[in-house]
Amino acid sequence: MKTAMQELLDELKEYQLEFNIPIEVIDMCESQLNVEKEQIIKAYNSAIPFKFGEEYYNQTYKQEIEK
């Protein structure tokens, strides 16, 4: 499973040359991955306070980043 930001980055990278997407745009989106991660963790922790949000994020999304 991928987050919305991960999907966006994949598409930007795929069409970068075809549509002349500046590398700075891709870099800005990549820098927002940590913001998105923190938002997911906070949302998970607020919904299920006895679970660990970071563990959930890593199990659900991190595996896609590493591929």
Image: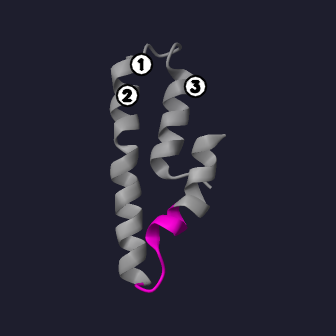
- The residue that appears at 38% across and 53% down in the rendered structure is 36
In the rendered structure, the answer to whether residue 62 lies left or right of residue 27 reads right
Residue 56: x and y, percent? 53, 68
Residue 53: x and y, percent? 45, 70
Write down the region rendered in magenta. 49-57
The residue carrying mark 3 is 14
Whole-Å distance between the Cαs marked 2 and 3? Answer: 14 Å
- The residue that appears at 52% across and 13% down in the rendered structure is 17
The three-letter code of the residue at mark 2 reads Asp
The three-letter code of the residue at mark 1 reads Ile
Secondary structure of residue under mark 1: loop
| Mark 3 nearby-residue class (10 Å; few <14, some 14–19, many ≥20) | few
| Mark 1 nearby-residue class (10 Å; few <14, some 14–19, many ≥20) | few
Q: Nearer the viewer, mark 2 or mark 3?
A: 2
Choose between 1 and 51: the one closer to the eye: 51
Sooner in the amino-acid sequence: mark 3 or mark 1: 3
The residue carrying mark 1 is 21
Whole-Å distance between the Cαs marked 3 and 1? Answer: 10 Å
- The residue that appears at 47% across and 75% down in the rendered structure is 52
- The residue that appears at 34% across and 43% down in the rendered structure is 32
Secondary structure of residue under mark 3: helix
Whole-Å distance between the Cαs marked 2 and 1? Answer: 11 Å
